[in-house]
Image: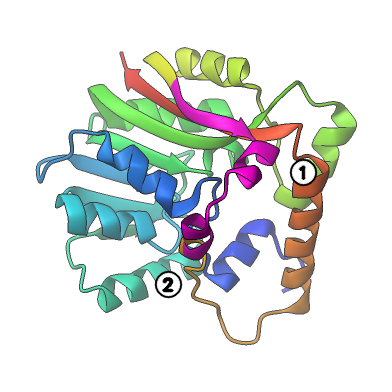
Amino acid sequence: MSEWTYHDALAQFGIGSAHPGGYGLTKELLAKEALTAKTRVLDCGCGTGRTAALLAKRYRCKVTALDRHPLMLEKAKRRMAKEKVRSVRLLQGDIENLPFADNSFDLLLAESVTVFTDLGTALREYARVLRPGGVLIDLDMTAERPLSARELEELSLVYGTRHVPTEEEWRGRLEQAGFDLIEVVKGGSVASALAALTEQQAADAQDIDPSEGIDTQLYEIFAAHERVTRQYRHRLGFRVFRAVVK
């Protein structure tokens, strides 16, 4: 393959929790929701299935996990078999054209995926498949201040992102898509997230399932990711948005 992407790198290395705050933050967010065996959950951009497995095992939710990358789904299936999770429905699909009927879910979880899509299209799809009163939890890359065209171009070369909104821009996009009661339940700059990283969070981040014979270009992609993370640590951050469908 000649043109590897950042998402190919995540899939090839099989990284279970690539977002700020990691698996610990995921568990913290889910613990605050009133999840039951009747809760219909969509895990958008499920990756290797770490969050989906947690939802099924700890909360007994009705979980559908979707990812566009076939290798991610292959590794998610392997996780489910290893952890003896049989109730998660795994599907390949596009966040911008979700293969579900209107009002299909009570909770939609998106961990560091929406920013890599056409934002308006993806957020409208989230609102469409959630029932009225359904909840979106979206953890996403956020600009601490508006980024210049040059900065956006540099980030796009690494991540393929079209735009990195500020917190206020995210709020506006969510409102336009049909969400209400929008709140930020967690967030900060990359620098603050790195400073707050605990030993447990670092240990949790070691959830990987690497493929054999990983191309050297993929290591270069991660080197570029680390360089950009350092360079933009005060200009980039993350926010966890909790929003309700009107």
Three-letter amino acid code at disc 1? Ser
In this rendering, the answer to whether 185 lies above or below 192 is: above
Residue 124 in magenta stretch: no
Q: How many marks?
A: 2
In this rendering, the answer to whether 100 lies above or below 177 is: below
Residue 4 in picture, x, y percent from top left? 72, 65
Q: Secondary structure at mark 2?
A: helix
Quadrant of the image occupied by residue 227: bottom right
Res. 192 in view: yes
Pointer 1 residue: 156
The residue drawn where x is 58% and y is 43% is 196
Three-letter amino acid code at disc 2? Lys
Of residues 210 and 207, the one nearer the viewer is 207
Residue 240 in picture, x, y percent from top left? 47, 31
| Image side of residue 112 versus residue 223, left or right | left
Res. 178 in view: no
Q: CA distance from mark 2 to mark 1?
A: 26 Å
Circle 2 packing at 10 Å, graded few (<14), some (14-19), many (20+), is many
| Image side of residue 126 versus residue 39, left or right | right
Q: Which residues are magenta?
A: 184-203
Residue 186 in magenta stretch: yes
Colour style of the rendered protein structure: rainbow
Residue 18 in picture, x, y percent from top left? 55, 55
